[in-house]
Amino acid sequence: MSKTHAIIASFPDTPSLYHAAEKVRDAGYKKWDTYSSFPVHGMPAAQGQPRSKVPIFTFCGGLTGFSIGLSIVWFMNFFDYPLIVGGKPFFSPVFPFPIMYELTILLSAFGTLGGMFITNLLPQHYNPFFESDTFLEVAGDRLLIAIEARDSKFDAQNTRQFLESIGGTDIEEITA
């Protein structure tokens, strides 16, 4: 026996999707999302989403790259094989600049990619939404709001009526 995963509703245009998202947020739903084939300016604020945590991963990756680059050159020039060439000091922060720069950029990029995968819970190989023809039309011109059944406020009948009251059409129950 299949169990309800979510209820989805279509909206005719971007402003109605935006205002419906504000109403869903104000109604207190927590496990829901909007879907469109293009970015909608201001949608994260309309959904009440906090700022992304991906920049923290980027900063940590960059700091790690900078530290590793500095440490490698220090270890090789000052500790492992100290060699005075032309009266230059064993270590100077000028020497490791290229390796520090490159490792900072490289590990920042890896941090960004890893942070994106972690915060978006990727890879996600299957989602019950993929079985819905209505959901697959999002790639074209469909605009959707989906409220998941795992939300504490979710009640199939009340949620369906709520989506109708905020202007949703083609309301469909997705089963898992």
Image (cartoon, helix red, strand yellow):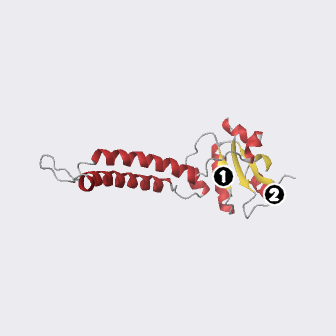
Q: Amino acid at mark 1?
A: Asp
Element type where label 1 sits in the image:
strand
Where's residue 68, x and y in %?
Answer: 36, 53
Q: Earlier in the sequence, mark 2 or mark 1?
A: 1
Classify residue 18 as left or right of residue 113: right
**Which residue is at the front of the view, 117 or 141?**
117
Mark 2 residue crowding within 10 angstroms, few (<14) / some (14–19) / many (20+):
some
Measure the C-alpha gap from mark 2 to mark 1: 17 Å
Residue furthest to the top = 140
Residue furthest to the right = 1
Is label 2 in contact with label 1 (beta carbons under 8 Å)?
no
**Which residue is at the front of the view, 140 or 150?**
150
Task: Residue at 65%, 61% (x, y): give it.
Answer: 26
Element type where label 2 sits in the image:
helix
Classify residue 124 as left or right of residue 83: right
Residue position marked by numbered label 1 in the rendering: 33
